[in-house]
Amino acid sequence: MSDQETHKLFERLPQTVVPTNYDLTIQTFLDTFKFNGHVIIHLKVNEPVNSVILYSADLQIDNATVTSNSKDELPGTIKMDQENERVNISFDKKLEKGEHELSLKFTGDISNRMQGFYRNKYTTPDGTEVRYGASTQFEPADCRRAFPCWDEPNFKATFDITLITPKNLRAISNMPIKSESEYPEDKEWKITKFDRTPIMSTYLVAYVVGEYDYVETKDSNGVSMRVYTPVGKKEHGNFALDIASKVLPFYAEYFNIKYPIAKADQIAISDFAMGAMENWGLVTYRETALLIDPKFSSMDSRQRVAIVVAHELAHQWFGNLVTMDWWTDLWLNEGFASWIEYLAVDKCYPEFDIWTQFVADTFARFLIPDGLKSSHPIEVPIGHPAEIDEIFDDISYLKGSSVIRMLHDYIGDDAFREGLHNYLKEYSYKNTTTVNLWSHLSKASNKPVNEVMSSWTLQMGFPLVTIIEEQQPNNIRVLKLKQQRFIADGSVDGENLQWKIPITIFTKSNPKAIAQQILMEKPEITITLNNVSEHDWIKLNYNSIGLYRVKYESKTLARLNEPIANKTISPQDRLMIQDDVAALCNAGHQSFVDYLKLLLSYADEDNFTVWKSIASTMGDLSSLLEYTDYFDQFKRYRLKLFSSIQQKVGWDPKQDENPLVAMLRPMILSIMGKSGDQAIIDEAKKRFQQHINGDLIDPNIRGAVYVIVSRYGDETTQQELQKLYKAAEMTEEKVRILRSMGQSSNPTIIEKTLQFIFESEDVRMQDTASGLVGCTSSSIGRDLVWKFLQNNWVKLVDRFGDKSSFLIAFVEYCLTDYADGKIASEIKSFFDSANTPIVTRAVKQVIETIHMRAKVLQRDSKAIQEYLTQ
Ligand code: BES
Ligand code: ZN
């Protein structure tokens, strides 16, 4: 959401004229990047009108007519409203109530901005020739750049799509091909007609033109499934095909509703802005989110592909069949899919222990932006379409899915499924809002879902539950719980927000079961536990399901060292204890020395996800302490902390090892390498040399090796990396290299990397963010990137478009790790005059974070130094 001042007057389209069917024909010219279009829109006119208004952007509409009762043809007068991306077509005679056909002929450009109908660049398999294809990306509001339409999610209609393309190219769309015939005007061209789509929203329409190979199968319900890949790489589609063919029937059964289209295709698009897009029947993906090289993809990529596929296929029901009425309820789409993707992956690939990862990657991650004063509620009023793009954020996805997980746990799987089924049935082929889901879940569970959930979705932030023990004799423990909003920098919540919190407590005497469960509806409550010895540990929030942080008194916290060290509590709980303490240290509730002491209990930890979480909190602390003169001492602490797990995982995979170990190894290696472990640095250099000479490094640790050699290497190393980059055939490998290049400690090399990322023909726009992240991994790099952003902002805005989420990513990734109030002011004044409203919130968040970090340094730096020196 932008600032109040930038809210423009906006009204949604009137319901007086509604489309029921689009008969769309598109002819593509990939040599000139132009397309011709003709659309006949069947309209239902509810009240007589003289004109109709619909959306159109970047299109040239040459001709408009309306036909009523299949005979009288009436010419229309076309008036564009560029600013609002609308077109008004007026007629001399009134269109009477009833059915009409609006015919529009138009032309447009196949753009280079990865939105609307846009071009994809690729090279022929032998690498010699550059060619282009084209594909669509319409969500949230870019269908209007491909054909004039009622481009709002609640104007659902059916679509009959026809593509006219050169014969040698594939033409693919949402639906199966109905007919293919020669184009009478040119024998080298063909006409492909597709079956009529179900009733659906415009943002889900898709068509792709280009050269592709594919693999295919049928799922257990007979749905035909293909994964389209670049030519010559069809075996890279097998992994995703396998997942999809398991996940699609899983959902059909879970929702108890069959998948309604005869086919479910997925396609890897060479230039793609996001991760993936759930177009009904034709899901589009970034290559790295779909393609797996059976030999050279990392375990991490496999897990990612499984997650993304499971996410997009969930939308085929939750989003496509049942759609939000307006973008305000986007969180429901994305939050739900981001929750159920875990359920599906857990069913198909239990070895990923994916629910534990949910806590580190989703739950713990939304707590960071949502702890800021500049956060926003999950449900945000969206007025102008320009505000839509920025709500595809961590709050919608990560908090949204965490809220669903809490709710699912609160009402139980049976009630959840029943309510969900009834909801999806009732709103199939229709639009809906959040409260309709709550009311079905209430009915199914007999619990006050709406009441409980609205405290989580309608207000921003989340509570900190403080627990204080009152002295009691005789195995009785009396706990006083108090809730208040947790604010990242420790400020007190002036609004005194309150939540309805499902609280659980468990103790040493029965560590695998909940001792007490209560819905906390007041600012303070008292809980009495009988038969718990006074020395036993007590923990709140069993498996970290409730959306709150916990603050223990120091003696209560100290008792948790034991179940952390001997792993009697779950990894979800182990990782959140340290995550909460780190957050409390940032907020000044306690000193970071406490955190560093607490981590000693994790010395024997062996769980991948717990380490991932520690690596993340330690990473934040590292980037802070890099601004002190005792950073080397800190690096020694870090070496010690990670050394025992490094010994355990080593360099090389053991036979039949757990996939999580394959993901843990590179993480540990790169931390140890960056902490200056000479043996590891030497080994990485050695392996890199062998790699260049053709003895390839295990793809799982390749990223870590690249990072280490880039950090400690010279110009020659960088040239080697660039050579590998250019030679790489897989996008996954290219991105791995690109990420490492900027991690050099040499400023000249970082500058060259920046140039390479943004100016080289070899780096796609879609991959710039990955490259930049590497450059900001050190304080020197951060300064160079900030300078670069300032000098090039206008150019970047022009290149990516002023609504591009890439701009948000640049601000977030590049500037958050500063720790100096002066820089925060510099950032503020720069963006105050930059006039790019899409980054307004990101800038606020960054500034708030920088101030928080600066305060931590002032407050704790001396004590940390003393602790590290003793
Ligand atoms: N519907 C989104 C794609 C999208 C994102 C469209 C932003 C318009 C703006 C899709 O379902 C999605 O969420 N994709 C994610 C990946 C997913 C696994 C979280 C993405 O692209 O990052
Ligand atoms: Zn999604």
Image (cartoon, rainbow, N blue to C red):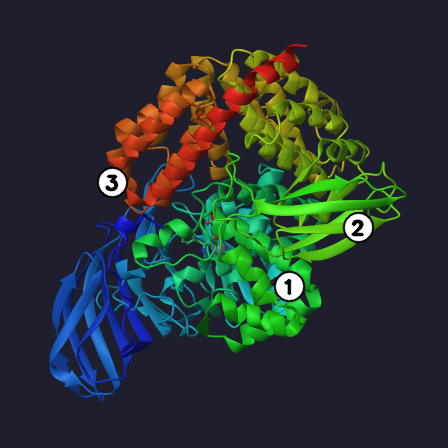
- Labels 2 and 3 touching (C-beta < 8 A): no
Q: Judge left or right: residue 264 versus residue 44.
A: right
Mark 1 is surrounded, within 10 Å at the Cα level, by few (under 14), some (14 to 19) or many (20 or more) other residues, namely some
Q: Secondary structure at mark 3?
A: loop
Residue 528 is labelled as 2
Q: Amino acid at mark 2?
A: Thr
Q: Amino acid at mark 3?
A: Asn
Position of residue 596 measured from the top left corner of the image (x, y, whole percent)? 66, 23
Q: Amino acid at mark 1?
A: Phe
The residue sitting at 53% across, 61% down in the picture is 454
Q: Which residue is mark 3?
A: 835
Query: Label 1, label 3: how many angstroms apart (C-alpha)?
Result: 47 Å
Vertical placement of residue 428 versus 469, above or below = below
The residue sitting at 27% across, 65% down in the picture is 11
Position of residue 678 measured from the top left corner of the image (x, y, whole percent)? 63, 11
Q: Which residue is mark 1?
A: 250
Give the mark nearest the N terminus, 1 or 3: 1
Q: Secondary structure at mark 1?
A: helix
Say which of 250 and 836 sits in front: 836
Work out which quarter of the rendered image holds the C terminus and state it: top right
Q: How many numbered discs?
A: 3
